[in-house]
Image (cartoon, rainbow, N blue to C red):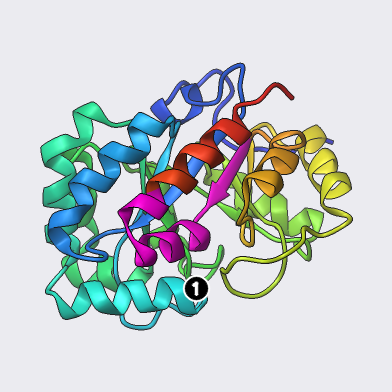
Amino acid sequence: MTLPGGAVGTRTRIGDAFGERTAFIPFLSSGFPRPADTPRLLERLAADGADIIELGIPFSDPLADGPTIQAASWRALEQGVTVGSALDQLAEMSADLPPVVVFSYLNPILRMGVERFLARAEAAGAAGLLVTDLPVGSHPALERRLAAGPLDLIPLAAPTTPGARLETILGHASGFLYYISRLGVTGARKALDASLEDQVRGLRKMVRLPVAVGFGISTPEQAAAVAGMADGVVVGSALIAALDRGEGAFGELSAALAAAVHRDR
């Protein structure tokens, strides 16, 4: 059985980012450590070889995130970062970036208004949207509207997601499947799950969308291992922790991760 996920033959900017090499997908929290830093950091990720960038919208109650990204989000909020300001910054430079996925919780989108958010995100040059706390089936009308909008709607799946549930999740999705490599919140880990390769291999046989793996990937060695089994590698907390130590550490890790992911499978 092949599970759905995007119309067959449909081309999107995000879909096109998955080519001959595994995609490196770094995460950056907008406004951290300072709002003025975000454009420069996005440029650095692009120069280092990011194929897709996840841009996090700060939120006061980021339940899916571990302490590293939570702290970054709170610091950005304290400095006045909003959905609007994050999209305004993206609009100024999106033409020079790889495809950007806006990573948000539902509340900031609802507060701006769904139609206004979609219009502004499209105008800013965003290519995709990932809403971490909108479980499939919880708000069907909203889910249909987001799926029908101008952005690829990126779905999440976990090791505990049963096949029937995965089929439902993928019904209106496009871009890529974000596979959570372990249960719990985001955050760096010392080791990968020993069964991860079997899990990803099974998914890639079933799902039409590219499969990108995230949660817990923190070193170039781990990134290289995941790149050998998946279509994309997502790294977030490790990069944010490095940025908290300084832009030098951030840039060094970004470049090393990109090189590791882009090695031949």
The quarter of the image holding the C terminus is top right
- Point out residue 234 in the picture as x, y percentages from the top left corner: 55, 48
Asked if the stretch drawn in magenta spans residue 240, the answer is yes
Name above or below for residue 22 compared with residue 214: above
How many neighbours does mark 1 have within 10 angstroms: few (below 14), some (14-19), or many (20 or more)?
A: some
Q: Is residue 48 left or right of residue 22?
A: left
Q: Is residue 138 left or right of residue 228?
A: left
The quarter of the image holding the N terminus is top right
Classify residue 53 by image quadrant: top left
Classify residue 76 by image quadrant: bottom left
Give the amino acid type for the residue marked by disc 1 in the picture. Answer: Asp
- Point out residue 77 in the picture as x, y percentages from the top left corner: 21, 76
Magenta stretch: give its range: 232-250
Determine the main secondary structure of the stretch shown in magenta: helix
- Point out residue 185 in the picture as x, y percentages from the top left corner: 59, 74
Mark 1: secondary structure: loop
